[in-house]
Amino acid sequence: MNEQNDTPSEQPTGAKQDAIDINDFVFAATGARVRRLTLPSGEHWFPAVDVGVHLGYVNTRQGVHWHVAADCERSLGDLVRTVYGTETSRNIAGHGLKKSMRMVNLRGLIQLVNGCTKPECAPFKEWVSEVIETIQRDGSYVLDPAPVQPSPDGTTAYLMPQQVADAIVRLEERNIRADEELAVARIERIEQMRRTNEHLGRITDQLGLTNEHLGRVSDHLGRTNDHLGRVNDRLGTLADRVGGVHDVLGRLADSLDVIADRLRPAGPARSAVTPQRLLATWRAKNLVVTEDVHAVAAYLAPALVHGPVHCRLEEVADRTGLTLDRVHDCVRMLLKRGCMRQAGVGAGGLPVYVLP
């Protein structure tokens, strides 16, 4: 089996030499170098799949069935086993071939070419038509002898028909142009890949720098969050301390009020003071400034005109509808404005308030 190449295959010993070089002949017909098996008799057989692919057949087996005569095609296994024997048929796989592969002889190849619609096959078909026409008219077709010295075995070489030679030249030129275009395309593709790789390299470097910067920013944010956490802890501690100081100052102010009440001499009797007059006096001195304070004062005034008052803030809140914190603030306001004073602590820890 001769592989696809540009070198003519060697003829088997004792075989008749081809008048036209078989490689050029097949190349003119198919536009490509195809593999072939040359029998000892000099008959050439070609893989139908090689021929069909280069001639543009989508389904090679169907093309062989439609265009090739039954005596012009055989399976490779039967062909080799018939000619060479069983031992040689076992070595077919070493040539990249399968026993089931369909093979066509030169007549079958020409039949496939005649059934092909590719424009490249037109010169070959024209020459075949000329051969048939010449034989029908003259009774024979003769090739012109080639202007070369006879070969050592005494045979004579013949000229390639002009149509076939022109087809070979066109196909060779087309292949050369295709090779050149392919080489240019490969160079452009390599250059494009190089530029793409450089661009990807720059992008990768930029991503690396960005990741490093993001890492540093994340570290800085982490340290900032830790610092803010410590600041919040310190602010919380300071707020607790300030609250404690306020409580101490409040208790100190209450104690000072108690001491001042104890040291102040007793005033005239207030048996004639009424709750309405007491509230009017507080309003005249602008001591009651809001409705909430007035409500608490109106609740405490009737009890204050009769003596000390054990003030339960919860009860005042229930009676006035104010919140407990608001009642506490109002009581502190009355104490600070001098409307009443604390005279100590009674049973159950309740503060005792009296008029100043």
Image: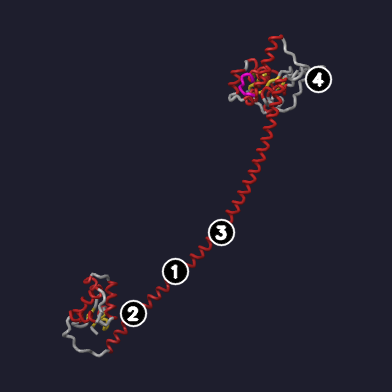
x, y percent for residue 234: 45, 72
* Above or below, 117 relative to 267: above
Q: Is residue 162 visible?
A: yes
Left or right: where does residue 118 sit relative to residue 295? right
Earlier-in-chain disc, 2 versus 1 = 1
**Residue drawn at the location 22% of the way across and 89% of the way down:** 267
Q: Amino acid at mark 1?
A: Asn
**Residue drawn at the location 59% of the way across and 18% of the way down:** 66
In this picture the colour scheme is secondary structure
Earlier-in-chain disc, 4 versus 3 = 4
x, y percent for residue 230: 47, 69
Q: Identify the residue position indicated by label 4 in the image.
A: 147
* Above or below, 218 relative to 128: below
Q: Secondary structure at mark 2?
A: helix
**Residue drawn at the location 36% of the way across and 77% of the way down:** 246
Q: Is residue 78 visible?
A: no
Residue reaching furthest to the bottom: 265
Q: Secondary structure at mark 1?
A: helix
Q: Identify the residue position indicated by label 1 in the image.
A: 232
Q: Amino acid at mark 2?
A: Gly
Which disc is residue 223 wearing?
A: none
Earlier-in-chain disc, 2 versus 3 = 3
Q: Amino acid at mark 4?
A: Pro
Q: From mark 2 to mark 1, how far is it between C-alphas?
A: 27 Å
Q: Disc 4 or disc 3, which is closer to the eye?
A: 4
Earlier-in-chain disc, 1 versus 4 = 4
Q: Which portion, as a residue range, is magenta?
A: 113-119
Q: Identify the residue position indicated by label 3 in the image.
A: 213
Q: Identify the residue position indicated by label 2 in the image.
A: 250
